Structure formats: C-alpha cells, structure tokens
Amino acid sequence: MLPTAAPDATAPPCLTALRGLAAGDYREYRGLAATCTIADADRALGAAGPTATGFPGGSPTRYRTYPPSAGAPAGLQVYDVDGAVTLIIARDAVPADTLDAMLGAPEAKQPSRMPGFKTMWIWASRGLTLHRDDSSGAVAWLYAYPPMTVDAFRASWLAKVEIHRTRVR
C-alpha cells in the first residue's frame, strides 16, 4: 500500500489528483487534465504492473495497474493514449470520508448497469463517477476522466458501462 501523506501544495495538479484518488480523498480532484501523463502516474503512484490492453468505450487502449492503496485496494488501472492519461478505474474504491463531505451532492444520478449495484453518482464537471450500492454505501467502481458536462457524460460510453458475465464451457 502507498503511504498517505498530506497534500503537497507545490506538486503539479496531476500528481495531486492521482495521489488523492489513490488515497480515496477526492477533495482536490478536478478531472484528468490533458497534461497528465503516464510519467506523472509513475511518479505519483509508484511502480506499475506490466502493460495490458483494455477496451474502454470499445477501443483497445493500453493500461497499467498501479499498486494497492488505501483508496484503491485493488490498485488503480491507468489508461493512456500516446502517454496521455485518459481514464482511471478503481474497483472497490474506499473513500477517505463521506462523499458529501468531499464532493457535495452529485450533479446527477442514474441507474448503474453494473451487476448488483444500484446507482451511478456523477460529478461530470469534476470528471468523476462512482457506481455505488445505496444500501451499503460501498463504491464498487470509480471512473476518473477529463471533466465534461452532465449531458456530454450521458452521451458518452461512460454512462453505458456494464459488465456481462458469460459462462465458459
């Protein structure tokens, strides 16, 4: 696990954002900046696992999984295109405080297509969506992306994320 530390006021915004996501502290997160690079992720999050390919939005995209941390016990999957970070996913994210305390009310909510989870809490202008079980409060999936409007979010593939389980014979 990564150590938790007080935010560094001199760190570039990308490093602060990445460290906050890893710690489960979303207060300073304002969306992925176009200047956020995989080199920034390496500096902020430590050594990553091997490069793999995922298919966010249906397009093959390179990603690396960074070590487990307090806010991302399964690690952070950091997707990049030509070295620019475009998406971060955390499974079973653990917020450091209540979502209301860190983010205020969500800009929108809508049903999640993830199995067993009830609602997507959307802060599109902050580039953050959490798939949350309202009965337990658990965050099953965290998606961090560049900021956008709620309408742009709803028109994007991010609003349609789902997991299908297929029996293999």
Image: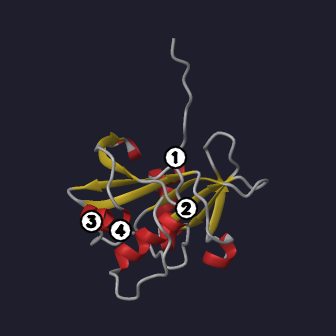
Q: Single out the mark in the foreground, 2 or 3.
A: 2
Q: Amino acid at mark 1?
A: Val
Residue 67, by quadrant, is bottom left
Q: Mark 3 near mark 4, Cβ–Cβ under 8 Å? A: no
Q: CA distance from mark 1 to mark 4?
A: 27 Å
Q: Amino acid at mark 2?
A: Ala
Q: Mark 2 near mark 3, Cβ–Cβ under 8 Å? A: no
**Relative to 25, 48 lies left or right:** left
- Tag 1 residue: 161
Q: Amino acid at mark 3?
A: Thr
- Tag 2 residue: 70
- Tag 3 residue: 37
**Nearer-N-terminus badge (4/2):** 4
Front position in the image: 165 or 38: 38
Callout 2 environment at 10 Å: few (<14), some (14 to 19), or many (20+)?
many
Say which element carries label 4.
Answer: helix
Q: Single out the mark in the foreground, 2 or 1.
A: 2
Q: CA distance from mark 3 to mark 4?
A: 11 Å
